[in-house]
């Protein structure tokens, strides 16, 4: 099994863990519309069964929608090697076939025609540690594939570097005459990573785990333990159109959202390096304070970079592209949907300070 595939596999399992913090559930093979295939979890499409690396379900279904299932694919390429359009093309093809797999429901009364309808509302997200090519982004937008990138989230930097530090010697070497195929190795690696997350790193090497002894130690120290330092995981839609994954070292404070679902926030990140939302009405150290880190979508990043030399233009970009973020996740152990809104008074004061310096 190629080491790049191993790294992507590990990142997928970490993404699934962060999704569970939001409220998603990992779909197990054998659940409705799925089966356990030679390569792992398979989902039934209109034309064929498809091998899916990772599938998550969101069981809190809003009215007027079928239950949500999210196909997850992750790539942990080296820096400077963004995910290309071919990955997104493959995702689009699988998603289309699965989404068109309609099921027949028997009529309620004799003589009536059967009803044909979908069972699930399928969506797909690709997660990348190195960003995406321009072609991949445009194709994904056209076909409603969500792209999440982790290039500039400081909380994830040690985790990503730990994954990139996985070497071929960290994966179990097979012996002549007893060579396992890649599918079997993949299953064992996934099982080990999931168990290490569940046991908070308290898992030790065994001959069937898929990793070498050094691999287990590297995974524990450089991937799993830094991951477990992230206690706040939230997904949101910026401006109603840009999907984002926001992370924090601690979960959002319940007291901040005790009597309100909308919080006025500042947006930090002029240098396009460390982007975050923080509340206007509290400061670091206060019980109501939080900082949610995110990686800015590439489309917006282009606008920000073009405006960096002009603070006034930069403020206008913030107003146009960061005016609100709808956020979903657990706050105080309860699933919530809240809105972070860019504070207009703070923005106006920011603009006045800029004008005064001219």
Image (cartoon, rainbow, N blue to C red):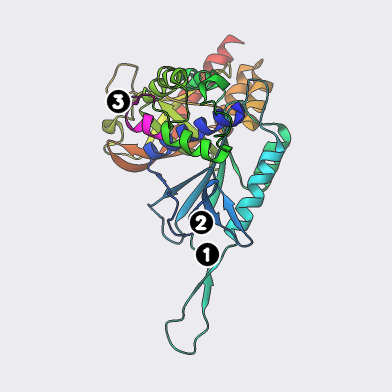
196 relative position to 116: left or right: left
Q: Which mark is residue 121?
A: 2
Q: Element at badge 1? A: loop
The residue mark sitting in front, 2 or 3, is 2
Crowd class of label 2 (few under 14; some 14 to 19; many from 20; radius 10 Å): some
Q: Do the numbered discs 2 and 1 sit on residues whose CB atoms are within 8 Å?
A: yes
Which quarter of the picture shows residue 252?
top left
Residue 220 in view here: yes
Q: In this view, does 117 lie above or below 14?
A: below
Horizontal and vertical percent position of residue 318: 56, 27
Q: What stretch is highlighted in magenta?
A: 194-205
Mark 1, residue position: 118
Q: Which quadrant does the N terminus fall into?
A: top right
Q: Element at badge 2? A: strand
Mark 3, residue position: 288
- What's the residue at 62%, 57% (across, down)? 97
Q: Nearer the viewer, residue 330 or 34?
A: 34
Q: Distance between the residues labelled 3 and 1?
A: 43 Å
Name the outermost residue toward the top: 357
Residue 167 in view here: no
Indicate whether residue 316 is drawn in magenta. Answer: no
The residue mark sitting in front, 3 or 1, is 1
Q: In this view, does 46 lie above or below 199?
A: below
Q: Nearer the viewer, residue 80 or 235?
A: 80
Q: Which of 172 and 273 is in front in this view?
A: 172
């Amino acid at each position: 099994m190629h080491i790049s595939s191993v790294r992507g596999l590990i990142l997928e399992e970490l993404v699934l863990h962060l999704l569970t913090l939001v409220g998603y559930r990992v779909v197990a093979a054998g659940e409705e519309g799925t089966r356990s295939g030679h390569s792992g979890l398979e989902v039934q499409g209109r034309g064929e069964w498809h091998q899916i690396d990772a599938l998550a379900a969101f069981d809190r279904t809003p009215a007027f929608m079928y239950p949500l299932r999210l196909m997850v694919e992750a790539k942990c390429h080296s820096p400077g090697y963004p995910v290309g359009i071919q990955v997104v093309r493959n995702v689009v093809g699988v998603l289309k076939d699965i989404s068109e797999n309609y099921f027949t429901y028997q009529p309620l009364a004799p003589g009536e025609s059967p009803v044909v309808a979908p069972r699930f509302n399928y969506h797909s997200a690709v997660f990348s540690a190195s960003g995406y090519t321009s072609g991949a982004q445009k194709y994904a937008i056209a076909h409603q594939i969500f792209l999440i990138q982790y290039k500039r989230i400081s909380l994830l930097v040690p985790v990503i570097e730990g994954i990139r530090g996985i070497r071929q010697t960290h994966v179990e070497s097979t012996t002549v005459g007893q060579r396992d195929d890649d599918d079997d190795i993949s299953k064992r690696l996934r099982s080990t990573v999931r168990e290490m997350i569940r046991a908070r790193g308290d898992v030790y090497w065994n001959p069937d785990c898929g990793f070498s002894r050094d691999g287990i130690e590297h995974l524990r120290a450089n991937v799993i333990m830094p991951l477990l330092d992230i206690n706040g995981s939230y997904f949101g839609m910026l401006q109603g159109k840009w999907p984002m994954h926001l992370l924090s070292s601690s979960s959002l404070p319940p007291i901040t959202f005790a009597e309100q679902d909308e919080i006025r926030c500042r947006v930090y990140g002029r240098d396009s390096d460390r982007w975050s939302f923080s509340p206007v009405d509290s400061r670091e150290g206060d019980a109501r304070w939080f900082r949610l880190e995110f990686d800015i979508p590439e489309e917006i990043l282009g606008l920000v970079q073009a405006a960096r030399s002009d603070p006034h233009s930069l403020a206008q970009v913030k107003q146009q592209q960061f005016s609100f973020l709808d956020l979903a996740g657990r706050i105080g152990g309860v699933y919530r949907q809240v809105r972070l809104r860019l504070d207009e008074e703070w923005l106006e004061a920011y603009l006045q300070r800029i004008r005064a310096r001219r």
